[in-house]
């Protein structure tokens, strides 16, 4: 992986972490990795093992493919939704279902 690819990957992770409203410290703790190490991943100075990539994907609620390459595979890829939902609590799942139902009924 080139330095530019590592930097782009770190930017994708930082954007998602910010969307989730987490600090680097909070994200690293949730992912069960060191804060300094996670910071190096975000700025592109360090690479990840497969184990770390899996932890980061789960915590960020992003697919590994998106983290690595910035794109999702497949035609109608529901993987990103599935990834988001997989990390939800039962209460969050019920709320997400209600929001989706309201969105689909809206008919824009």
Image (cartoon, grey):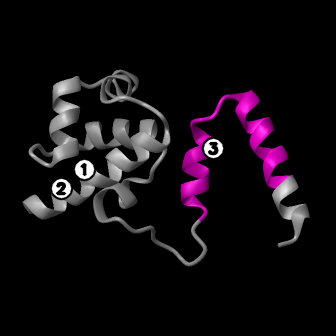
Question: What is the span of residues highlighted in magenta in the rendered image?
Answer: 78-101
Q: CA distance from mark 1 to mark 3?
A: 23 Å
The circle drawn on residue 85 is: 3
The percent position of residue 73, horizontal first and vertical second, equals 45, 71
91 or 26, which is in the foreground? 26
- Which quadrant of the view contains residue 32? top left
Sequence-wise, the earlier of marks 1 and 3 is 1
The percent position of residue 66, horizontal first and vertical second, equals 38, 60
Dot 2 corresponds to which residue?
Answer: 7
The residue depicted at 80 percent of the width and 36 percent of the height is 94
Can residue 103 be spotted in the picture?
Answer: yes
100 part of magenta stretch: yes
The percent position of residue 99, horizontal first and vertical second, equals 80, 48
- Which quadrant of the view contains residue 53? top left
Is residue 65 placed above or below 96 in the rendered structure?
Answer: below
Residue density around tag 2, few if under 14, some if 14–19, many if 20 or more, within 10 Å: some
Cβ–Cβ under 8 Å for marks 1 and 2? yes
Can residue 1 be spotted in the picture?
Answer: no
The residue depicted at 88 percent of the width and 70 percent of the height is 107
Sequence-wise, the earlier of marks 3 and 2 is 2
The residue depicted at 23 percent of the width and 24 percent of the height is 35
Q: Main secondary structure of the magenta part?
A: helix
**55 displayed left or right of 42:** right
**80 displayed left or right of 3:** right
């Amino acid at each position: 992986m080139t330095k530019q690819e590592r930097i782009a990957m770190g930017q994708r992770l930082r954007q998602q972490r910010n969307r989730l409203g987490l600090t680097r410290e909070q994200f690293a703790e949730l992912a069960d990795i060191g804060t300094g190490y996670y910071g190096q991943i975000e700025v592109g100075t360090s690479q990840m093992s497969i184990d770390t990539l899996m932890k980061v994907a789960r915590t960020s609620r992003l697919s590994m493919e998106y983290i690595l390459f910035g794109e999702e595979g497949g035609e109608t890829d529901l993987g990103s939704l599935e990834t988001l939902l997989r990390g939800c609590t039962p209460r969050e799942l019920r709320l997400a279902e209600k929001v989706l139902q309201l969105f689909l009924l809206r008919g824009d």
